[in-house]
Amino acid sequence: MANCADVCATLVNDFLYDCNNKSTGGIEQVVKLVNRCDIDISDWDIAVSSETACYHQIAYTGEDPTDLNAVKAQGIPGKRLLNAGFNSVDQDYGTYFTHFVNIFGQGLSEATLCNIRDLANGADVVAFVEQKDKGSDGESAFLVYGFDAGLKLGDITYDSNENNGNTPLPLTTKDDDLEKNPPYVLKMTDYETTKAFFESL
Amino acid sequence: MTRKELVKLGSNKVRKNSKLTAKYVNYLKEDAAYIYKSGKIPEGCFGCQFSSHFAKWSRYVNSLDQEMANKKEVTMANKKEVTNTSTYKLKDSKTKIFFKGSVLKNGSDDKLWIDFIKHNKDREKARKELFEVLPKDLQPKNASKAKEVKDKEEVTTKEDEQK
């Protein structure tokens, strides 16, 4: 039997059911996308640990979120056109993750085509997502997808007879460039502060 | 063991040790009046909501520390005179902006908003657009003088009309 001191990680959190806080699916229909090249790693504090308590969070320590030049992707309120998730991928050297965030472009406008072209030309992004399920006190409301490896353009098909003429745009982790962790929880002091950060992007 | 020490140990460690759990529950009962609207620990499966209760209690304990720190700061600042002014009017009073680690909102000090507005020259104009009335120090002096003159003129005209 391996000694716990010799392994990288141990499970320390119970999986408990909170009777008063049932989970809900879905995400709020606004996602903020930041070009990975605008991320200055010294402006971020990543806390990933399982030693005494489990941490899996990220916080912005920079001054002004506007410096991140975020782009807003908006869905239709009340619909589930934007969604996000991740899959685990077994590799020879460990288990990695594929993150994905699905957005869409309204119609086939010039702006949509420009975005598709830029993504096809190598733009990769980090997505900030607000979950509908925010935790009992808003502590896990926001998730960050693609922080370590970036989300790139997935396979797209446009058909003028499909999707009411809109263009679904899948953003996803690509093979050989997998994420080493599941999405980080974005957490700054409390929900109000984290929400203000998200809104200020 | 103090409240602060229990908070530092974290919910999982406290839960796994019956003595620590008992201590925590005693503290939680004492503090419930400040944490829950009902003034007591909500009924229901306590174990199922252990982490959630612990998180709320931790925040309360940490806020006590913050309160003490604030009191100290205010006491220190009293000697130098506290100056918290808000002379502006936001177009949307619900506006909340994250800037330099804190949230700027309606009622925040003028100085914080001015720092935000002037942080980047390219964005200054757009940021001023958030305000119906700018913080006093950013209001154009000529404009305010002109307004004063105009107001005086209006008063004089009204007085003349009454005569």
Image (tube, rainbow, N blue to C red):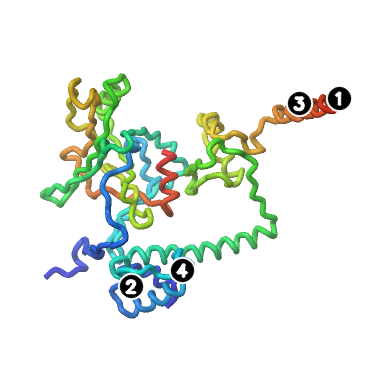
Who comes first in sequence, dot 2 or dot 1? Answer: 2
- What residue type is disc 4 on? Gly
Residue bearing the label numbered 1: B160
C-alpha gap between disc 3 and disc 4? 56 Å
Asked if marks 3 and 4 fall on the same chain, the answer is yes
C-alpha gap between disc 3 and disc 1? 15 Å
Which chain does the residue under circle 3 lie in?
B
Query: At which x and y percent is residue A145?
Result: 28, 43
Looking at the rendered structure, which numbered label has been put on residue B14? 2
Residue bearing the label numbered 3: B150
Asked if marks 4 and 1 fall on the same chain, the answer is yes
C-alpha gap between disc 2 and disc 3? 68 Å
| Mark 4 nearby-residue class (10 Å; few <14, some 14–19, many ≥20) | few
- What residue type is disc 1 on? Asp
Residue bearing the label numbered 4: B39
Query: At which x and y percent is residue B157?
Result: 82, 24
Q: In this view, does B77 lie to the left or right of B15?
A: right
| Mark 1 nearby-residue class (10 Å; few <14, some 14–19, many ≥20) | few
Who comes first in sequence, dot 2 or dot 4? Answer: 2
* The N terminus of chain A lies in quadrant: bottom left
Query: At which x and y percent is residue A151?
Result: 25, 37
Who comes first in sequence, dot 4 or dot 1? Answer: 4
C-alpha gap between disc 2 and disc 4? 23 Å
- What residue type is disc 3 on? Lys
